[in-house]
């Protein structure tokens, strides 16, 4: 096991999950959001459900959301400004569950 650098408060950082384990952890929250039919951003779902960050945030969030699109769970429905700290009001996609997700036909 490689040595870990302690954080500034002296504690060790939480071990990051591998991609598949991370997806298994966060996917149920996105499925629940898709079933409501309400509009959301991925950050809103992550914040509301206190979801863990992936090992590679710059790539993994996008890959995960696009997998939901490919599987017919969510669809793009608009744009908004990010509420993510440090996002400097960048534009982000807004999603909603597909009709199939809202009726429980896909998950």
Image (cartoon, helix red, strand yellow):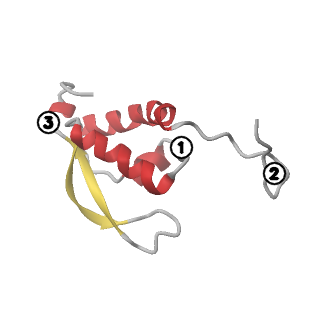
- Determine the CA span between mark 1 and mark 2: 23 Å
The answer to which of marks 1 and 3 sits earlier in the sequence is 1
What residue is shown at x 23% (from left), y 35% (from top)? 71
What residue is shown at x 15% (from left), y 32% (from top)? 100
Q: Residue furthest right?
A: 10
Determine contact: label 2, label 3, CB under 8 Å.
Answer: no
User: On screen, 43 above or below 37?
Assistant: below
Percent coordinates x, y for residue 63 in the rendering: 36, 47
Q: Residue furthest bottom?
A: 88
Marker disc for residue 50: 1
Q: Closer to the camera, 2 or 17?
A: 2
Residue 3 in sight here: yes
Percent coordinates x, y for residue 97 in the rendering: 22, 41
- Of the residues tagged 2 and 3, which is closer to the observer? 2
Q: Residue furthest left?
A: 99
The answer to which of marks 2 and 3 sits earlier in the sequence is 2
Determine contact: label 1, label 3, CB under 8 Å.
Answer: no
Quadrant location of residue 101? top left
Quadrant including the C terminus: top left
- Determine the CA span between mark 1 and mark 3: 26 Å
- Determine the CA span between mark 2 and mark 3: 47 Å
Q: Residues within 10 Å of mark 2 (few under 14, many from 20)?
A: few
Percent coordinates x, y for residue 60 in the rendering: 44, 48
Badge 3 marks a residue whose secondary structure is helix
What residue is shown at x 19% (from left), y 37% (from top)? 72
Q: Which residue is mark 2?
A: 6
Quadrant location of residue 29? top left
Q: Residues within 10 Å of mark 1 (few under 14, many from 20)?
A: few
User: On screen, 80 above or below 10?
Assistant: below
Marker disc for residue 99: 3
The answer to which of marks 1 and 2 sits earlier in the sequence is 2
């Amino acid at each position: 096991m490689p040595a870990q650098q302690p954080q500034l408060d002296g504690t060790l950082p939480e071990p990051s999950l591998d991609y598949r384990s991370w997806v298994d952890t966060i996917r149920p929250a996105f499925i629940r959001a898709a079933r409501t039919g309400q509009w959301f951003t991925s950050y809103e779902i992550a914040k509301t459900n206190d979801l863990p960050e992936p090992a590679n945030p710059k790539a993994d969030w996008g890959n995960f959301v696009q997998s939901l699109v490919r599987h017919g769970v969510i669809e793009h429905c608009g744009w908004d400004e990010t509420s993510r700290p440090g996002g400097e009001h960048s534009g982000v996609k807004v999603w909603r569950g597909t009709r199939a997700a809202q009726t429980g036909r896909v998950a």
